[in-house]
Amino acid sequence: MNIVHESFPVGPLQCNCTVIGDSVSGRGYVFDPGGNPERIMAAATRMGLHIEALIHTHAHLDHILAAGEISKQTGAKVCLHRDDLFLWNALEQQCALFGVPYTPVPAPNHWLEHNEELDLLHGCHGCCIHTPGHTPGSMSFHFAAAGLLIAGDTLFLGSVGRTDLPGGNTQQLVHSIQKRLYTLDEGTVVITGHGANTTLGHEMRNNAYVNIRS
């Protein structure tokens, strides 16, 4: 398998950004470019990747702030689920609310769909999973052959995404986790939106908010 990946916190709220790609073809994605574009691009260069797409788990400010600069440098397409467009378009208001400097981002030019295949990676196809709840357009991304799930702010180590912000819905969040994430292999490593990684099996059995029997 030729997949390479690296995750690290970026931006004002330390969102976990993931750079992932095919070491043979050099094609790569960035998931959740929430800030520090120079660090993200340095990682891509070190991994030998040309970034073809910026893929967003959702449109809260801390997951999208570097999209403009990286898109300008690479020509990468900007990908989002359409149901989060209202948040994307409200970035300036989000920044004002949280006291974060406003950095404009380009309009998305690719709408992600549930079960859409990410066919970039040689021998390691990814699948888009619509997981609404934290936001209406929240997405998770499953790379089965690599045993990876990029979950954004849907699922955390021992916790789940908040649902008290505009568009949040607790019932949807529980359904997304139980019916769409907990059906995957329990050995899958979860790259969360903030903080430490976990595994689906650990969360199924131990998550105090949504476990396999909730």
Image (cartoon, rainbow, N blue to C red):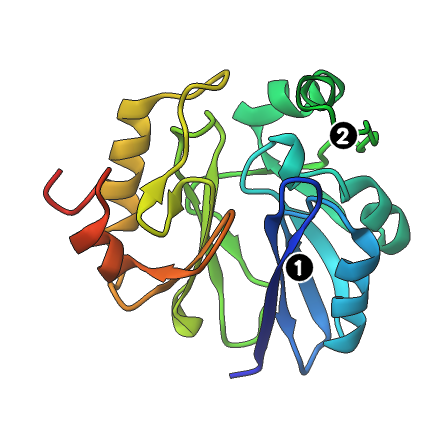
- Please tell me which of labels 1 and 2 falls first in the chain: 1
Residue at the disc numbered 2: 107
Give the percent coordinates (x, y) of residue 80: 61, 37
Q: Residue at x 41, y 29 (%)?
A: 162
**Does residue 156 sit above or below 121 in this rendering?**
above
Q: Are there few (<14), some (14-19), or many (20+) residues within 10 Å of tag 2?
A: some
83 left or right, relative to 8: left
Looking at the image, which is closer to me, 57 or 40? 40
Q: Residue furthest right?
A: 73
Query: Residue at left 31%, top 24%?
Result: 170
Q: Where is residue 183 in the image (x, y as percent from the top left)?
A: 23, 52
| Left-right relation of 38 to 200 | right
Q: Mark 1 points at which residue?
A: 29
Q: In which quarter of the image is residue 22?
A: bottom right
Identified at 24% across, 63% down, the residue is 186
**Dots 1 and 2: beta carbons under 8 Å?**
no
Using the image, determine if residue 180 lies above or below residue 125. above
| Vertical order, 15 against 61 (above or below) | below
Question: The disc labelled 2 sits on which kind of residue?
Answer: Ala
Element type at marker 1?
Answer: strand
| Quarter of image, res 51 | bottom right
Q: What residue type is labelled 1?
A: Tyr
Left or right? Give the position of 166 relative to 101: left
Observer-nearest of 209 and 56? 209
Residue at horizontal 60%, vertical 76%?
4
Q: Position of residue 69 (x, y in %)?
A: 86, 45
Residue that sits furthest to the front in the current view? 99
Q: How far apart are marks 1 and 2 (CA)?
A: 18 Å
